[in-house]
Structures are given as structure tokens and as C-alpha cells.
Image (cartoon, rainbow, N blue to C red):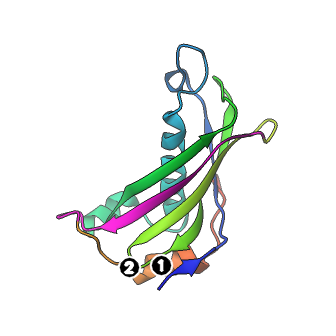
Amino acid sequence: MRAQNTGLSFTHRCRVYYEDTDAGGVVYYVNYLKFMERARTERLRALGFVQSQLAGENLLFVVHSAEARYLAPARLDDELLVSAEVVELNRASLRFHQQVRRAGDDALLCEGRVTVACVRADSFKPRAIPEALRAAFSGASPIPAGE
């Protein structure tokens, strides 16, 4: 069963640190994927699920594919707003649309689509997303970061 456009958005705030930048003083391109990963993790946490506990229940989410489009650079000390919106919920996978924006001027810096697969922690074989997680992703109101 495929659910399209669940429409629940979530935003995670983070800051650009020196370690995130390259020799040119801007965020190194791969670090946008790290920011997106953190937003997805915090989205789970806001829904009441913690990755370490899920792993203990033999469940992991692994990135299946990622696509990113870079539009403008983020720089040292910028505050970023990173969204994580589920746009497709399948039996054993989720597809996210994500954006990284600069908080100061709301400029869109990067956007991407990331598909994550639900797998067994002991074998990395696909498994169905548990009903509690499925219900949370398809109908719960996310808690804004910091609340």
C-alpha cells in the first residue's frame, strides 16, 4: 500500500560549524546530506521514536538513494532550518523531500529527495515498517524542534 503526500512537515534548527566548511569557507557539499540525516533523526524523535531503541527492536532505517540540488552556499555560523517532509510512505520505505534554508533570510540553499529503507538490524534484509511508525508518519502532528 502506497500513501502519497502525507504532508507533515518538520524543521530542525542547526548551526554551521568550522568543521562543516571547506577551504573556501562555505559548507562542504556532502555536509548538507548530514544536516538532512539529522533532521530525519530528529523527526523520528519528535514522533516518539529513538533510533537506538529501534535498533534494539531489530529495526534500522538505511539510505537507499539520495538526490541533492545545491542553490546557494551556507557559511560559518549560519543558522540553518532543515526540513524533513515525508512525501511517500510504502510498506518498507519512506521518501522524504528535504530543504536546507538559512534562518536569517529564509534563502533556499539545498534541497533533496532521500529514500530510506526499513531493514532488519541483524541481517539488513527489508522489513515492513511497524504499524506504530506507519501511523505516526502518516497522521501524527510533528512536534516543532526545541519544544
Looking at the rendered structure, the secondary structure element under dot 1 is: helix
**Farthest right residue?**
105
Amino acid type, mark 1? Arg
Residue 49 sits in quarter:
bottom left
Is 91 part of what is drawn in magenta?
A: no
Name the residue that disc number 1 marks.
Answer: 134
Q: Nearer the viewer, residue 1 or 39?
A: 1
**Start and end of the magenta stretch?**
107-124
Residue ID for mark 2: 130
Number of other residues with Cα within 10 Å of mark 1, as a class: few under 14, some 14 to 19, many 20 or more: some
Can you name the residue that lies furthest to the bottom here? 1
Q: Is residue 57 above or below residue 50?
A: below
100 sits to left or right of 103 = left
Q: Residue at x 46, y 76 (%)?
A: 90
Q: Position of residue 5 (x, y in %)?
A: 63, 73
Residue located at (67% from left, 29% from top)? 73
**Image quarter for residue 57?**
bottom left
- Badge 1 vs badge 2, beta-carbon distance below 8 Å: yes
Q: Amino acid at mark 2?
A: Pro
Mark 2: few/some/many CA within 10 Å (<14, 14-19, 20+): few
Q: Nearer the viewer, residue 145 or 138?
A: 138
3D distance between C-alphas at marks 1 and 2:
6 Å
Q: Is residue 64 above or below residue 91?
A: above
